[in-house]
Image (cartoon, coloured by chain):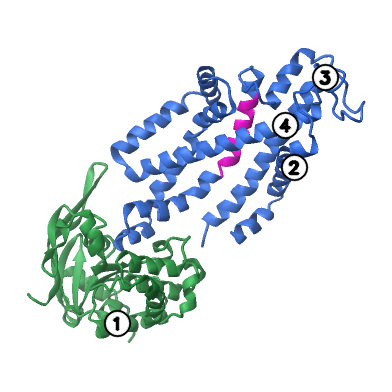
Amino acid sequence: MKAFVRRFMSSPEGIAGALVLLLLALAAVLAPIILPGDPAAIVGRPLLPPFSDASFPLGTDQLGRDVLTRLVYGAQASLTVGLSSALVAILAGTLVGTVAGLAGGLVDEALMRVVDAFQIVPGFLLALAFVSVAGPSLAVIVLAVGLGAWTGPARLARAEVLSIRERDYVASARVIGMHPAEIAFREVLPNALPPVLSLVSVIVAAAVLIEAALSFLGLGDPNAVTWGGMIAEGRNLLRSAPFLSIIPGLGLVSAVVGIYLFGEGLVEALSIRGRRA
Amino acid sequence: MSGDLLMVEGLSKRFAGRGRSVRALDDVSFSIRKGETLGIVGPSGSGKSTLARVLLRLIEPDAGRILIDGEDWRSLSPKALRHRRGDIQMVFQDPLSAFNPRTTIGKAIMDPLRIHAVGKRHSRMAALAELLQRVGLSADMASRRIHEVSGGQRQRVALARALASRPRLVVLDEALSALDVSLRGQMLELLVRLQRDEGISFLFIGHDPAVVRMISHRVAVMDQGRIVETGDADAVFSDPRSDTGKALIAAIPTWR
């Protein structure tokens, strides 16, 4: 673990990404403390441009709501959805992939055909359909995005398990009489996990974008302030008040770039571990 | 014979793939007595490792019987097999790949103690230290991982793990091949001493006839899945009857 942190700290991309994410996470967590205002409350004159009024540093929208407060609360929604759906996708994918890889035969075939079926439908379309049916709420969006993203981890976990189960240390565990379930969870799974974890950043970034796109299309959680929703609301005023869309857009870009950079550092730290002498 | 610990009759195993099949084991029969070392030599691909894995029931053979102390090893249920596995242990060729890279040496050796309930929980730490000491390692080795110790120590750790469940037979599959000459000598001495003190039987698989001769009481020569010759180690090595045996002996470098 110590070596892992040291390797991560030696990657400049990783550090940059970690800083961006730390900033966003701090903003999201501390939102109610640093900006006690209600993001939905009308607090000033509508359409104040940024930097024109000290009490509204990023201006106000067409209803007179504070853009900075909404931006920070939007970070909360985006990061929550991104991280939760990545968690759902990784957990479900790893479980299915590990079972398929270890069981082999018919079980493997059946599970992988299900994976194929999910994989041929674009993730966004899947999320769109799922939210249309189940109704827009953050929990549904998390499940919907996870549903579109679990196939990658499933394939990767299966491939890893297929290679690991032929290793001598698994044979050796059988020789000492270890129970198959213990072999799966103690010998195989921990060694199959690192490559799967390197997918986290890609999934989180995609999830943040999908959530924004859903909100933009009006399928976001109507009770949550989200970046996608803010961009959508600013669309009609794109000529007269472009900052309404640009500011949440910048938030989105910095979050996605930060997550990718963080992922780079993660991959570097993890792949060196896999290359043991 | 009553002194036989392991008796193998008519083991056959065929690997099929892409239209052609390979006879890895072809009607293999032999026996090992208590406290005896049977050496197996043969060229690469002669079925030595398959034989080891079939005995350990890592691979199921197509036909044949494996009797341990007269008990049919192949008819055991998976659960019964797990409980009995402590009787036969194995040391793999490459200790680096035979240990989970994430677990410590101590935990790896404790696993068989726990699984086969050797001793009470609180006495297992002492058992661990004693096992390490028996193979000539210090107890502080337990907190390290397998890639953190030297090559010679690794194979001693593997031996300690194999000995933990108090086996009656240990299969050593090219277990000394990766070691340099002086370490190999030390390991051979260790194995001979363990056998003398505790009466363990060994099945010693090697491709180097000189090493196999040093440790084995009897030797079987394998070629293309078949045992082509068996006999006392000295007899086989000084006067091989089979072509494979002759070729192996001829391959030992001599200086005159």
Between A78 and A274, the one lying in front of the other is: A78
Q: Earlier in the sequence, mark 3 or mark 4?
A: 3
- Number of other residues with Cα within 10 Å of mark 4, as a class: few under 14, some 14 to 19, many 20 or more: many
Disc on res. A23: 2
| Residue found at x 37% / y 54% | A182
Q: Nearer the viewer, mark 3 or mark 1?
A: 3
Q: Residue A212, percent across and down?
A: 65, 25
Q: CA–CA distance between discs 3 and 2? A: 26 Å
Disc on res. B194: 1
Q: CA–CA distance between discs 2 and 4? A: 13 Å
Span highlighted in magenta in the image: A198-212
Q: Are marks 2 and 4 on the same chain?
A: yes
Per the image, the residue denoted by label 3 is: A64
Q: Chain of mark 3?
A: A
Identity of the amino acid at label 3?
A: Gly
Q: Is residue B202 left or right of residue A19?
A: left
Q: CA–CA distance between discs 1 and 4? A: 69 Å
Instruction: Find chain A in the image and tell me its colour.
Output: blue
Per the image, the residue denoted by label 4 is: A73
Between A117 and A58, the one lying in front of the other is: A58
